[in-house]
């Protein structure tokens, strides 16, 4: 896991929160919501709102005895939900990955990739035309139930992800264009009062008082997705594939690269080039650290 410096939002438990206007992309029935939180010691208030829409749409609440409350709106009630997770299932002053899901049949609550509570969903959930809040009372504009601690990497999907899917990406940054991802706030801006939605839906949030801080213990690696690779050597020569062979490459943190699949066997090529090749070709293959 990485120990690199990363940006997160810090909420003071007094008046910090984020408001996201309602949009059609946030009015979803099946869902998965994910967030990383690092709560301070026992909160001042009994309940802390983490993320969700008013009307109890895909709500995540933190209880002062260290458990997560998952609430949603269905035909039976505006306060339906799974059983609470066990007390002390959330660890104070450490990063906890929280996820909730609902497919209309079963609603689940995960902590650090493991199911901690589940129950019947009671049918398709109801989507309300209400704003989404983070960091305080989720039922509307009531100025209470403020969260105290750090928060990062808030994701909303329009389907119930499986346990394997949640585990596979909980420690990875996303690209923002993943199928089913309708809102994604990494909280990596490091400046300003806007929490930018990295999907194409534009669900940007207004930050009220919460501040940007740098941390080195957030258990997230670099974002997944496509990336470009330099195709010129440091001397300006273009790499080419005259034989049109199918080749893929494996990159290592040291900066070396090597073919992982090729028509012919090629030894590892590092910054020094491929030693077996004549000098006239070395400068074309040399790839700098």
Image: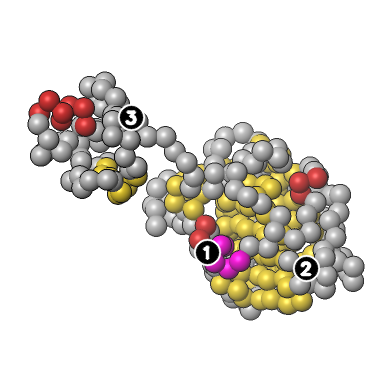
- Residue position marked by numbered label 2 in the rendering: 104
- Residue that badge 3 annotates: 231
Look at the image and tell me whether residue 200 can be seen: yes
> What span is in magenta?
162-166
Q: CA distance from mark 1 to mark 3?
A: 34 Å
Quarter of image, res 1: bottom left
Q: Residues within 10 Å of mark 3 (few under 14, many from 20)?
A: few
Determine crowd level at label 1: few under 14, some 14-19, many 20+ residues with C-alpha closer than 10 A: some
Q: Position of residue 113 (x, y in %)?
A: 55, 68
Upstream in sequence: badge 2 or badge 1: 2
| Chain-order first, disc 1 or disc 3 | 1
Q: Mark yes or no: residue 50 visible.
A: no
Q: Residue 241: image x %, image y %?
A: 30, 33
Q: CA distance from mark 2 to mark 1?
A: 21 Å
Q: Are marks 1 and 3 in contact (CB under 8 Å)?
A: no
Left-right relation of 238 to 86: left
Disc with the residue nearer the chain's start (3 vs 2): 2
**Could you say whether the residue bearing mark 1 is in a helix, strand or loop?**
helix
Q: CA distance from mark 3 to mark 2?
A: 49 Å
- In the picture provided, is 256 more to the left or to the right than 171? left
**In this rendering, which labeled residue sits more in front, label 3 or label 2?**
3
Q: Secondary structure at mark 3?
A: loop
Q: Is residue 232 above or below residue 269?
A: above
Q: State left or right for residue 248 relative to residue 210.
A: left
Q: Nearer the viewer, mark 1 or mark 3?
A: 3
Reply yes or no: does residue 134 show up in magenta: no
Q: Which residue is mark 1?
A: 167
Q: In the rendered image of this protein, does residue 267 appear above or below residue 166?
A: above
| Residue shown at 20% from the left, 44% from the top | 266
């Amino acid at each position: 896991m990485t120990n690199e410096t990363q940006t997160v939002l810090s909420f003071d438990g007094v008046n910090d929160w984020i408001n996201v206007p309602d949009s059609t992309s946030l009015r979803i029935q099946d869902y998965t919501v994910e967030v990383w939180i690092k709560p301070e010691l026992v909160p001042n208030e009994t309940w802390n709102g983490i993320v969700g829409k008013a009307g109890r749409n895909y709500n995540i609440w933190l209880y002062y005895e260290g458990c997560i409350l998952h609430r949603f709106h269905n035909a039976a009630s505006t306060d339906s939900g799974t059983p609470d997770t066990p007390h002390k299932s959330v660890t104070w002053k450490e990063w906890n990955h929280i996820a909730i899901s609902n497919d209309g049949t079963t609603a689940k609550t995960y902590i650090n990739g493991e199911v901690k509570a589940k129950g019947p969903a009671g049918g398709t959930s109801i989507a309300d035309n209400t704003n989404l809040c983070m960091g305080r009372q989720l039922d509307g504009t009531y100025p209470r139930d403020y969260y105290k601690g750090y928060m990062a990497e808030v994701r909303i999907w329009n389907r119930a992800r499986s346990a394997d899917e949640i585990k596979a990406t909980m420690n990875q940054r996303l690209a923002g264009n993943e199928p089913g991802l309708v809102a994604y706030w990494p909280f990596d801006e490091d400046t300003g009062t806007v929490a930018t939605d990295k999907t194409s839906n534009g669900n940007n949030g207004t930050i009220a008082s919460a501040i940007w801080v740098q941390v080195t213990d957030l258990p997230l690696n670099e974002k997944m997705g496509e990336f470009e690779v330099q195709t010129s050597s440091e001397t300006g020569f273009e790499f080419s594939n005259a034989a049109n062979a199918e080749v893929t490459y494996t990159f290592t943190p040291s900066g070396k690269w090597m073919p992982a699949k090729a028509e012919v066997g090629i030894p590892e090529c590092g910054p020094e080039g491929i030693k077996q090749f004549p000098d006239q070709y070395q400068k074309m293959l040399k790839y700098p650290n």
